[in-house]
Image (tube, helix red, strand yellow):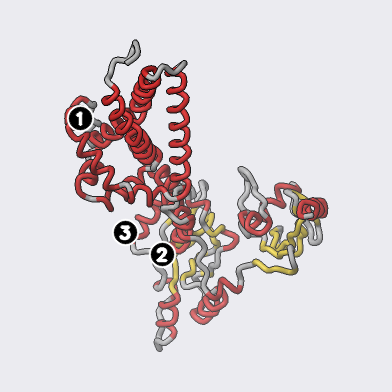
């Protein structure tokens, strides 16, 4: 044995036999735990059950277990450098520890490359396959986990202040983001969950039917006229007003109209309406939904700061904010989206600007408007006339119909310069 060698060759040999596979395995096990998101880890622990499930359900013990694995994955390479260096020194090799360090560095690099490949290919299956190995390592490290866990500061009790509630909302958003990114949630599921999270803070003004689009009728109308109004609109409920739309007296259901038409002596229309629920534009959707449920109502009338009617909102509008647009047969026919030819569309002025992204891959950042008409008004600074052309965002908007200072339909296509650039890119 050469000078400077402190362990007998047999011990060094056994150290290599143990440390080489242990170094690789602890690195793999630690990396999988550290780089797996909370959703994936929870799912794995539930599937594994037994001691691993109990470990995961005890956050402090689970944190200590992860720490010990991480510590071993860093400590074992150092021990390998020392063991291999002493063996080379015993064989009188030049620069023994330099060669030893180079070998271990290559081993660590290959292990890290393998870890990345596992994480990129199928980390869920890797966790499942290595479950028995995790159990074995936990069995070995359990005494240390039990010894160190009491030394870790405990989390605060369940009482929460406003800052913690805000942090909880951020955690929910993080879970959705991680779940979507890791493939645990489908993109559509992630979008729906995002909608649910945003739902409680969204204001009524962003989902309401604006005043100009409301289908209403005077409360003095005859039942036959109201029945015709229901047929024309395709709605099941209509607000009734007195004198002007700013004085809504109630909401009429088509069921009450049809029932009254069968009576020999029908009651006055005013007796058929239900008292309306008036809400401000700034009311958030989460509160509104609870209020509508408590009052067993389907419609709310939105008023502005001066008390005038700003619009109306229904339970269907609230549901659509979560699950997306819901159109019945009548609405589908009047959806206001018509393809004229390849790359050319006719849109309603009230169509949402997100349609432009869906049809032309055009993103409007931080807009001050929500509709195609709003985009045109913002670009021109005035009410357009029929036939007027607006080029913006790489698109050409041709106004086809205007009524009462309101843009009804617009022809949309790529602007000539934008179309040429697209063709050159494809070429």
How many marks do you count on the picture?
A: 3
User: CA–CA distance between discs 1 and 3?
Assistant: 55 Å
Residue ID at (20%, 39%): 139
Q: Which mark is residue 294?
A: 3
The image position of residue 26, as x and y in percent, is: 33, 35
Quadrant (top left, top right, bottom left, bottom right) of the C terminus: bottom right
User: CA–CA distance between discs 2 and 1?
Assistant: 60 Å
Which of these two is toward me, 108 or 360?
Answer: 108
Report if the CB atoms under discs 2 and 1 are less than 8 Å apart.
no
Which of these two is toward me, 61 or 397?
Answer: 61
The image position of residue 190, as x and y in percent, is: 45, 53
- 338 shown above or below 184: below
The numbered mark, 1 or 3, whose residue comes first in the sequence reads 1
Residue ID at (39%, 37%): 31
Quadrant (top left, top right, bottom left, bottom right) of the N terminus: top left
* Residue 314 as seen in the image, left or right of residue 67: right
Regarding residue 283, the answer to whether it shows in the image is no
* Residue 119 as seen in the image, left or right of residue 290: right
What residue does disc 1 label?
144
Regarding mark 2 in the picture, which secondary structure is present there? loop
Regarding residue 54, the answer to whether it shows in the image is yes
Q: Quadrant of residue 365?
A: top right
């Amino acid at each position: 044995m050469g000078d400077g060698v402190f362990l007998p060759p047999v011990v060094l040999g056994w150290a290599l036999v143990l440390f080489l596979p242990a170094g690789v395995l602890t690195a793999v096990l630690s990396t999988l735990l550290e780089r797996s998101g909370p959703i994936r880890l929870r799912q794995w622990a539930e599937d594994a059950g037994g001691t691993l499930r109990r470990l995961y359900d005890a956050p402090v013990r689970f944190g200590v277990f992860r720490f010990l694995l991480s510590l071993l994955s860093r400590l074992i390479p150092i021990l390998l450098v020392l063991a291999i260096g002493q063996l080379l020194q015993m064989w009188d090799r030049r620069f023994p520890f330099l060669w030893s360090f180079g070998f271990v560095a290559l081993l660590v690099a290959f292990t890290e490359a393998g870890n990345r490949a596992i994480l990129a290919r199928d980390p869920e299956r890797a966790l499942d396959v290595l479950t028995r190995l995790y159990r074995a390592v936990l069995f070995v490290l359990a005494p240390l986990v039990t010894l160190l866990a009491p030394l870790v500061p405990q989390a605060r009790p369940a009482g929460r202040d406003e800052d913690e509630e805000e942090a909880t909302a951020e955690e929910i958003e993080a879970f959705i983001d991680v779940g979507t990114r890791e493939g645990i949630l489908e993109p559509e599921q992630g979008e729906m969950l995002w909608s649910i999270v945003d739902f409680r803070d969204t204001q009524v003004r962003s989902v309401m039917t604006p005043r100009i689009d409301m289908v209403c009728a005077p409360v003095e109308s005859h039942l036959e006229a109201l029945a015709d109004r229901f047929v024309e609109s395709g709605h099941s409920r209509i607000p009734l007003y007195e004198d002007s739309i700013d004085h809504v007296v109630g909401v009429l259901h088509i069921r009450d109209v049809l029932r009254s038409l069968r009576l020999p002596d029908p009651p006055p229309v005013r007796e058929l309406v239900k008292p309306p629920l008036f809400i401000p534009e700034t009311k958030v959707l989460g509160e509104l939904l609870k209020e509508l449920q408590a009052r067993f109502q389907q419609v709310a009338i939105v008023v502005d700061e001066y008390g005038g009617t700003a619009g109306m909102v229904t339970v269907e509008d609230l549901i659509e904010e979560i699950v997306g647009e819901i159109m019945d047969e009548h609405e589908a026919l009047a959806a206001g989206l018509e393809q004229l030819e390849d790359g050319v569309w006719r849109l309603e002025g009230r169509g949402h600007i997100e349609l432009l992204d869906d049809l032309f891959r055009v993103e409007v950042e931080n807009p001050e408007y929500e509709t195609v008409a709003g985009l045109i008004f913002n670009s021109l600074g005035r009410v357009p006339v029929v036939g007027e052309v607006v080029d913006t965002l790489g698109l050409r908007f041709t106004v086809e119909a205007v009524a009462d200072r309101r843009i009804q339909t617009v022809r949309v296509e790529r602007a000539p310069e934008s179309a040429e650039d697209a063709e050159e890119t494809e070429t």
